[in-house]
Amino acid sequence: MTTPQEQNFMRKISAEEKIEPKDWMPDAYRKNLIRQISQHAHSEVIGMQPEGNWLTRAPSLRRKAILLSKIQDEAGHGLYLYSACETLGISRSEMIEQLQSGAAKYSSIFNYPTLTWADVGAIGWLVDGAAIVNQVSLQRTSYGPYSRGMIRICKEESFHQRQGYEAMLALAKGSEGQKAMAQDALDRFYWPALMMFGPHDSESAHSQKSMEWKIKRETNDDLRQKFVDQTVQQIEVLGLEHPDKNIKWNEERGHYDSSDLNWDEFWSVINGNGHCNRQRVEHHIAAHDEGEWVRDAITAYNEKKRAKKAQHAA
Amino acid sequence: MSDQIKQATLEYTTRLGDDSVVLGHRISEWVSYGPFLEEDIAYGNVSLDYIGRARMFYTYAAELADDGRDEDDFAYMRNDREYRNLLLMELPKGDFAYSQVRQLFADVYYTLMLPELLQSKDETLSAIAAKAIKETKYHLRRSRDWVLRLGDGTEESHQRAQKAVDQLWGYTHEMFDMDETEQLLADAGIGVDVAGLRDRWLQMVTDILMQATLEVPEESWAVRGGRTGYHTENLGHMLTEMQIVHRSHPGCKW
């Protein structure tokens, strides 16, 4: 038995109408969105750390400026997404608590360390590249604030991918040492980037319901295939070796065939065995705790101002 | 442009570039360490402004030097003894109060100095000043607001802000020192007579500190040396980190 509210909700979903914050929605839809959007926001925020790791060592002033600007954008994306998520009835401080307690996740890609300057290029190219494939699809997501946030974010992300690829190109066309650095970064980040699309559809816990509600618009495997396909030629232009020795064009499918991924490693890193899982969360907690006296100062200052104003009025 | 003036302008432009890159670098150390997300963004933004200024000053310095060097050679291929930045800029980031008080001192300085540089007979320096003035207006609004909130916030924030003022005060004096190079350029209408800015700087800073319920230090300690390359121990470490990748791959493009 479906209620009239449920029928109306499903009618909107079928008609590609956006669901807005004040509209009725099933609890599970709300929960599912909070999980996905907050995870996305946390990813933007935690993602500042591996790139920030190279801010003070960027090899030219131009690269330093680009990296600063990019990280600033990521923080901005975190802000839009926290705001979009707040429209579902959860506060930013609750979301931060969930991140710090481990109740909420962030993209596992950021549990991998950034070891050389080339990793900054690889992240822009592959990690942001994979994120864009996913986000382009999410521009059509059924929840209005999330969809509008994605449209805005996609514009900036495509700049990020270009700068990452351009940084890799400079290395790949540079000295032997630079080229080796680029190859090493590609070898390390290629596989985790493919895993960013999530497990196979058959293994994905949230996929089916998310597709039905049009929170997700394309399956993990379809999105991953798009990314595999678009990356082949990019690697060729760089003149680097493809990390997947089994990559092969399949005329019949119209796609590249590729090796299966090492899902044991994927789950192992998600479950805490990455190089940086603890470090990333500890860093966030430490900065947040150190900032407590600053946040307290604002509150105290604003209260003093209010009290003075009230006294003045009386 | 006479050779003497050209040499002096090169030296002067390099100094201004050094101030910008060093402070910009210190501010960038805050990214992902701010008290909340909006501050991470603000720090990134301010840092970016200073790195942008450094690039403009160094590009002009490279043009004046005309010896095949580019902006990155100025930033990455000089040692700490060759850097000519003010000591205030190179001090470690410290806590949030320390960084904001340093920023206030620098922002008030630039608020006074840049409009003078805008009047420079040197068109390039004037153009850089024109761009930087707009940025500094926003920077000062932010650092002033923060010093007010911290000074007149909680007991803890007040103490931290006062400690920062006391610890940084001795590094502010050399901002107003003139040497032969700067005097030559000031007389030629190219450089700024910073000695003449001191009273106004003190007045503006005093007003803000008093409003923030903070005390203006009375001690007369003063540390000097940035403009002659006589730095604190901090700059060497900062440059080691900043220059490591660039210097590990000599002659490479990035």
Image: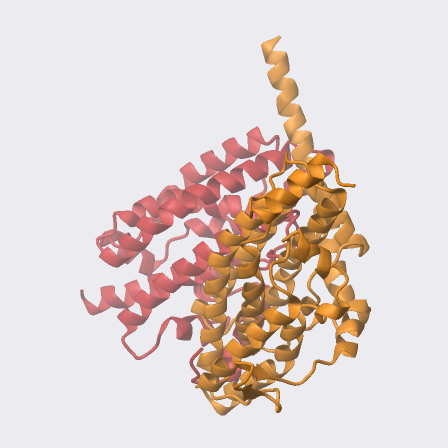
Chain colours: A orange, B red
In the foreground, A9 or B139: A9
Residue located farthest toward the front when viewing the structure as drawn = A1
The quadrant of the picture occupied by the C terminus of chain A is top right
- Kindly tell me whether residue B114 is visible in this rendering: yes
Nearest the camera: B5 or B53?
B53
Q: Residue at x 47, y 41 (%)?
A: B140
* Image side of residue A56 versus residue A274, left or right: left
Q: Is residue A64 above or below residue A182?
A: above
From this view, report whether residue A5 is shown above or below residue B118. Answer: above
The one of A294 and A182 positioned closer to us in this rendering: A182
Say above or below: A33 vs A279.
above
B215 and A251: which one is in front?
A251
Residue B82 visible, this orientation: no
- At 72% from the left edge and 51% from the top edge, which residue is drawn? A32
* Percent x, y of residue B104: 52, 43
Left or right of residue A250: residue B197:
left
Estimate the x, y position of residue B113 in percent, counting from the top left.
37, 46
Q: What is the quadrant of the N terminus of chain A in the image?
A: top right
Above or below residue A159? Residue A241 is: below
- Residue placed at 39% from the left, 64% from the top? B55
The image position of residue B28, as x and y in percent, is 55, 59
How many tags in the picture? 0
Instruction: Name the residue furthest left.
Output: B1
| Residue A292 figure quarter | top right
